[in-house]
Image (spheres, rainbow, N blue to C red):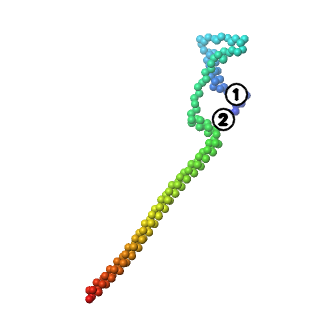
Amino acid sequence: MKQKKINRLIHAGKTLYEKDAYGRFLLSKFALNKTEEDPIDLKKTDSSSFEDKEIEKPRFQKKSALLSVKDFLYDNWIIALISGVIFLVIGGYISVYREQGVQGEKIMTIEKNIDTINKQYNDNQNNWNDLDKRFEVFRAEVSKEIEFIKKKLKL
């Protein structure tokens, strides 16, 4: 997250460690049945009752993934916007390219079917022409035989 500018003349916040230490300080002041510690020897400059106590550090929970993403988008909204536009353009290009491939496949299938139909039509046309020629030959032969039979019957 972006850090807000703090007006140092108005307010100075405490960190979690400072708040925790201050809370423990307040509890120790008002706790009953507590004995006082040995007074600090002012002649010793290297000792301190504060340093003797070990400060417990609070455990922090890890940020959830959703909160991390939300913080990233809040801090880097321009990058997120540009990335989204790029993602949409690439996705659109891929879908159009895929759709063109599908349409191309359909066109190729239709062209193959048309070629097959043309080939069948040409084969049928050739067969029809053969049948027509054979029928003409058959008709000529039958007409000759009929005329031959007519001549025989007239005699």
Q: Residue type at mark 1?
A: His
Up-down relation of residue 118 to residue 105 (above or below): below
Would you identify the image quadrant in which residue 131 lies? bottom left
Q: Which residue is mark 1?
A: 11
Up-down relation of residue 138 to residue 78 (above or below): below
Q: Which residue is mark 2?
A: 2
Residue in the image at 28% along x and 84% along y: 149
Q: Position of residue 43 (x, y in %)?
A: 72, 11
| Quadrant (top left/top right/bottom left/bottom right) for the C terminus | bottom left
- Whether residue 26 can be seen here: no
Label 2 secondary element: loop
- Dots 2, 1 in contact, CB < 8 A: no
Tag nearer the camera, 2 or 1:
2
Residue in the image at 65% along x and 23% along y: 18
Would you identify the image quadrant in which residue 145 lies? bottom left
Q: Position of residue 101 (x, y in %)?
A: 52, 55
